[in-house]
Amino acid sequence: MLVLARKIGQSIVINDNVEVLVIEVRGDQVRLGIDAPRTIPVHRKELLEQIRAENVQAAAKADLDSVSKAISELSSD
């Protein structure tokens, strides 16, 4: 992991097309501005992890529903 120190108004550039700018520092919070092409998704990590967990739960439920349906169909034959 690369660790950098930046001041308000300073930025870092990633891959020549993503810029992360320090907007404000207030206590233990840092406000960042991110300028990236629309083709590059930018998400807060905690939301991305929540979405992934919900997708896993939905897939597991769909699999369970499919198995239940198949068992019901076999039982009715």
Image (cartoon, rainbow, N blue to C red):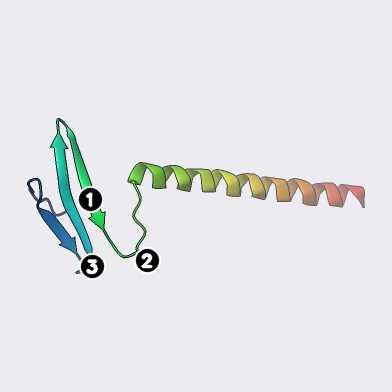
Q: Which x, y percent locates residue 16? A: 19, 69
Q: Which of marks 2 and 1 precedes in the sequence?
A: 1
In this rendering, position of residue 63 left or right of residue 49:
right
Q: CA distance from mark 2 to mark 3?
A: 11 Å
Q: Residue 68: which quarter of the image?
A: top right
Between residue 34 and residue 75, name the one nearer to us.
34
Residue type at mark 1? Gly
Q: Which of marks 3 and 1 precedes in the sequence?
A: 3
Q: Which x, y percent locates residue 19? A: 20, 59
- The reply to whether the C-beta atoms of the residues labelled 1 and 2 are less than 8 Å apart is no
Residue matched to label 1: 33
So how many labels did they put on this image?
3
Residue matched to label 2: 39
Q: CA distance from mark 1 to mark 2?
A: 17 Å
> Badge 3 local density, few (<14 within 10 Å), some, or many (20+)?
few
Q: Which x, y percent locates residue 63? A: 66, 50
> Badge 1 local density, few (<14 within 10 Å), some, or many (20+)?
few
The secondary structure type at the circle numbered 3 is loop
Q: CA distance from mark 1 to mark 3?
A: 14 Å
Residue matched to label 3: 17
Q: Which x, y percent locates residue 21? A: 17, 52
Between residue 1 and residue 44, name the one nearer to us.
44
Residue type at mark 2? Thr
Residue type at mark 3? Asn
- The reply to whether the C-beta atoms of the residues labelled 2 and 3 are less than 8 Å apart is no
Q: Is residue 6 above or below residue 18?
A: above
- The reply to whether the C-beta atoms of the residues labelled 1 and 3 are less than 8 Å apart is no
Between residue 64 and residue 50, name the one nearer to us.
50
- Residue drawn at (44%, 42%), measured in percent from left and top? 50
